[in-house]
Amino acid sequence: MSERFESHAQTVVGLTLLSRVTGLARDAAISRIFGAGALVDAFFFAFMVPNLFRRLFGEGALAAAFLPTYAQLDRDDPATAKRLASLTIALLLVLLGGLTLLGEGALYLVSRHADHENLAVWLMMVTLPYMPMVCMVAILGAMLQVHGRFGPTAAAPIVVNVCLTATAVGLVFVLDPNDERERVVHVGAICGALLVAGMGQVAWSLWALRGEGWWVPDLGAAGAPLRRVMWQAGPMMVGLGVLQLNTFLDGLIASYPSLVGSTIFGVEYPLAEGAMASVTYAQRLYQFPLGVFGVAIATAIFPALARTAQDGAAFADILRRGLRLVVFVGLPASAGLILVGRPLAAVIYQGGEFTPDDAARVEFVLFGYASAIWAYSMIHVLTRAFYATGNVRTPVKVAVSMVALNLGLNCTLIWTPLREAGLAWSTAICAVLQVSLLLALVRRRVVPGARLADRAVLRSWGKSIGATAIMIGAVWLIWTFFDRQATTWREALPQLAALVLGGGFIMLLAALTFRMPELGWILAREARRHEGTKGRHRRTRG
């Protein structure tokens, strides 16, 4: 089992990489068409609530509570597992559908109070129905993962990215980019395309599950397991969703100039219009390696942890491998993004309405977020370790304190010269503190008596630090051959290519020189060798 999750991780990493690439293509189109002003602030604000529900109820709390229970029932009582799946989906549709209707009503009242002139509220009304659809996709995806199918869910975001990109680019040839009213219609159409994409995601997930026969009309025996799932989902919403809550708070604070105005209680607000756009564009960049590797590893490891929750030795072994992998990938990702931030922001976003000053603003915010990619990745793995054993209280206590600290730091650091970058540094500081607390607590309350940071783990972390340091030196040397004041994305492209390819090659060379097995785990070579050896042993015994 400890070897198998790396093979699943490879599938998730590959498809998540493709979805993130299409996501960057979507953002590249939006940045060039609309720039980084108040209109884009409103656009990104409209996606905040659906994304929050997706991360907390769908990919986060509910899916995290549902997966271990469903996995156990699928192993011990498949009939009850099917009833649980049917009842969960039905309840999700009823509750979130009703919540969507209430939300639409509340947003309409807010919009009417503002004489229907608040664009952000209007756009949120368009995007809100996406919330129940994406949460349903997450639960269907958890079912697919238990059945050993990680591909459909990892690929589902591609549907959204393709729909939004096609709408954004296609309407350029229809609408006048110099007419403000038509620009608003353009943004509204992109939000509408999100709903079409959501229906496509649901249909795709249902099609992938068609052979499992999970939908059954008899739901009587599913009440007890569903209550267990719902009992755990509430605390998990806070525990697993702390990073998302912090991101949501960042967005509220960054959106204030576009939503309310330039002053607060008669004092000049420290952030200007475009702050929300800059923060969101920076988040997209640091979430690329986080989603491709960090979250992918945690997603793949979760079913393995859930299935070995009663076997302390196997559980600890899987968790150690996960911790080694996220540091092996996350640490160089943090350093690399910091080093290539400027040309990366220019290549992805710059052009059209997006200026070099906008790119510099994104780079400044990215510096803060990127510094803790390794910590964000480790949080996902450690939190799932708690949840796999049914311990939901401990991560909740840690998470609540982190949310409170993040809010305090947010409201403080934006008044410094960091401005909106203070939101990024606040998130990074809280992530590092959260990792420290979770590492100390997981040994005491999840795998008591087991030493997670054993000699092999510490040696692996040390090698990852050494390899990253070598990579930093190599990238810094490559930088000396370029003019860092590139004014167009075409000038920044060769810089970015040289830095990424050079840094990646040096990191690969260092990993091979240090004989780090994590490289083989990422490529799933060890898993394939192990499975082949087991097959030969079975044939020999036979």
Image (cartoon, rainbow, N blue to C red):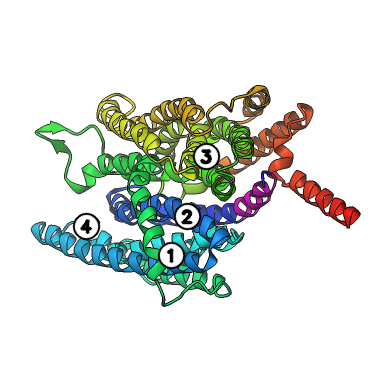
Label total for image: 4
Foreground residue, 255 or 389?
A: 389
Classify residue 181 as left or right of residue 174.
Answer: left
Residue 121 — which label? 4
N-terminal of the pair, mark 1 or mark 3, is 1
Give the SS element for disc 4: helix
Image coordinates for residue 141, horizontal then vertical, percent: 50, 61
Q: Which residue is mark 3?
A: 381
Image: magenta residue range: 3-14
Q: Which residue is mark 2?
A: 69
Q: Nearer the viewer, mark 1 or mark 3?
A: 1
N-terminal of the pair, mark 2 or mark 3, is 2
Marks 4/3: CA–CA distance: 35 Å
Foreground residue, 530 or 365?
A: 530
Image coordinates for residue 84, horizontal then vertical, percent: 43, 65
Residue kind at label 4, given as amino acid type: Val
